Image (tube, coloured by chain):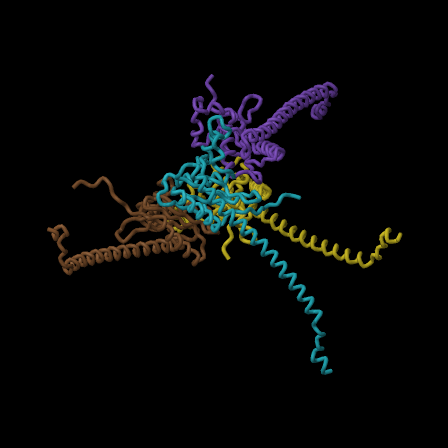
Chain colours: A brown, B cyan, C yellow, D purple
Amino acid sequence: MAPAATISQPTLTLAGARTTLAAAEQHALEIGVPMNIAIMDSHTHLLAFTRMDGAKITSINIALDKAFTAAGHRVPTSAYKENVWPGGMAFGIGNTNGGRFCTIGGGVPIIDDDGRILGAVGCSTGTPAEDEEVANAGRDAVLGLIREEKENEKWTEVMEALEKEREREWKRVRKEITPPADPPVEEMMQ
Amino acid sequence: MAPAATISQPTLTLAGARTTLAAAEQHALEIGVPMNIAIMDSHTHLLAFTRMDGAKITSINIALDKAFTAAGHRVPTSAYKENVWPGGMAFGIGNTNGGRFCTIGGGVPIIDDDGRILGAVGCSTGTPAEDEEVANAGRDAVLGLIREEKENEKWTEVMEALEKEREREWKRVRKEITPPADPPVEEMMQ
Amino acid sequence: MAPAATISQPTLTLAGARTTLAAAEQHALEIGVPMNIAIMDSHTHLLAFTRMDGAKITSINIALDKAFTAAGHRVPTSAYKENVWPGGMAFGIGNTNGGRFCTIGGGVPIIDDDGRILGAVGCSTGTPAEDEEVANAGRDAVLGLIREEKENEKWTEVMEALEKEREREWKRVRKEITPPADPPVEEMMQ
Amino acid sequence: MAPAATISQPTLTLAGARTTLAAAEQHALEIGVPMNIAIMDSHTHLLAFTRMDGAKITSINIALDKAFTAAGHRVPTSAYKENVWPGGMAFGIGNTNGGRFCTIGGGVPIIDDDGRILGAVGCSTGTPAEDEEVANAGRDAVLGLIREEKENEKWTEVMEALEKEREREWKRVRKEITPPADPPVEEMMQ
């Protein structure tokens, strides 16, 4: 069979982005580091952004680039650590995409349990480790929500199937216990 | 007297940006046009951003540029309408600032009652008129909040002044009605 | 209590920038290295710039980028030295912000005694050590001026308070020593 | 004769740029419009810049681009008015030079009495007419200074020539009135 001409791809919605953003922000508050937090969809386009009071101005762009890179390359930006050193196989990759390819930790992709990319979070103002920690908190929150929604969806499907089964059963039972209908009046008049 | 080496300037906080964003989004929902909404501070730096589901991807950048332009030039981007036509006095201004200077309606500055720039909202996906309407809704909401906060601040000051006055009065009264203290025990023993 | 919608932030004025510029230039003359000197406000926007005769043309941009980076990230650009080497935690950060993030010594933030960012100086043409030395001279001069202004402000407040106190005292004394006013002429005529 | 391999070209120094800047700033104060003022040398490179308190942030770049354009194309940026309209012979020129070619009034070249380009001033924040007026004030001041210096130079040359002439004359006179020297002692001893 030839491949289909179209495909449907999952991506975060604004609702998903907000869950991510809220959890990341909450975590940043907990560790006491105000952050720039950017959420991109699975196509590297910005969905939501927050600059917490006190976050660095020159980190706005870094947060955006981290999310961009993680959404597009589907790995955490921290993964590049050794690969981008001189001699590493990705040395120089930071110059690509107009310099937007960011190889500093703090960008993490959001990948569902089926391995599909949904989007990415990028954080910046703290150390790369802090930035990544905050981004992970955002990612975990939205993946938790997605699993819950999936669970709910399964339950809904099961419940709907049960409901249908029960209805079918009822129809059958009703049929069995229903006495034969009286013959139509016209017949009785004959 | 020589001019001072520093000055203090107001700007939106994230809280102010959120009020703006929420009101703009609400208005976009009411008119049924999903929008990209960008909020910048008084220094043209991004504070918060939301892409509503269904908003155009190529309008992300336009919303950002509208907010940038309104924050920096302190007028609605719609003000440029005729000035940037051939023969208009600002014809060509759209090429400046690396092409980020946007002369399409939908960017509005947030200016307080003392005429000070606080930030800007930029909206994009609808017609320029719709975009500006949504941006205005955001601006009006935050200006309303700021007026309320100012009013509260005044009340707090008045209440604190009254409280101090009352305390002074009490001290005076207490002094008047207090009988002279007994001499210290040591003195009585002598 | 909810966070306020606006905040007031300090920044250098042109007067402050000029003091910085003059001191940096003076120091550059003393060490015999003509410099490009850029002064930015606390929001990474250019306030003042000087290219001394003989300074390198391709260092104009470097001075600007150093000031930009120091103002936005609030640390001297020399702080990145080892962090941006291969293996360093900020390796690759120089590609961010459209390549404007400069990690070469010579950019220093101007931070007041309360830890607030006021702006930055960026110098370029000499060695990074010379550039930073010149930038430091500029920063020290303006911080000295700011401390002086603060001291003067306190004195002004104290002097005004004393003046008011003295006036109140005079009024009281004058009241005590003033003989009761003669009754109005009309009364005397009756 | 073959053309020479090198040439000497005049350009503004920092001293010249400062005269230009000071006069432009003074004029901006007089008309009550705070400006961004950029001075470039004859090779389109930045020499000096001032952002007056209250000038627009998004006009920093515009002032720079106006000076860049006027220095490079050697005409006031206002000269493009009709040429860049649709149908005009320079329509589209604003996109060149990476979008830095600015066709809005406010950039003026500094050209000496021999028609040689020395640099340019670019101003921005007011209307194009105000911006150009302020730029002209800067240009006129430095051209006045240059004429004065040239005049002084001529006088210096004349005075030096006179001085030399007088010296030559003195030598001649001294020779005439000097009695013949006594013959050397050795000769007398013979």
Does residue B82 lie above or below A53 as drawn? above
Residue C20 visible in the picture: no
| Drawn side of residue D128 relative to residue A32, left or right | right
Q: Residue at x 71, y 21 (%)?
A: D170
* Residue lying furthest right: C189
Q: Quadrant of residue D114?
A: top right
Q: Residue at x 54, y 49 (%)?
A: B147
* Residue lying furthest top: D1
Number of residue marks: 0
Could you say which is closer to the camera, residue C170 or residue C101?
C170
| Drawn side of residue B161 relative to residue B104, left or right | right
**Can you give x and y, in whole percent of width and height, for residue A29 in the image?**
44, 57
Residue A11 visible in the picture: yes
Could you say which is closer to the camera, residue B76 or residue D4?
B76
**Can you give x and y, in whole percent of width and height, for residue C50 in the image?**
55, 37
Could you say which is closer to the camera, residue A96 or residue B163?
B163
| Drawn side of residue A159 relative to residue A173, left or right | right
| Drawn side of residue A119 relative to residue D32, left or right | left
* Residue lying furthest bottom: B189
**Can you give x and y, in whole percent of width and height, for residue C140 in the image?**
57, 48
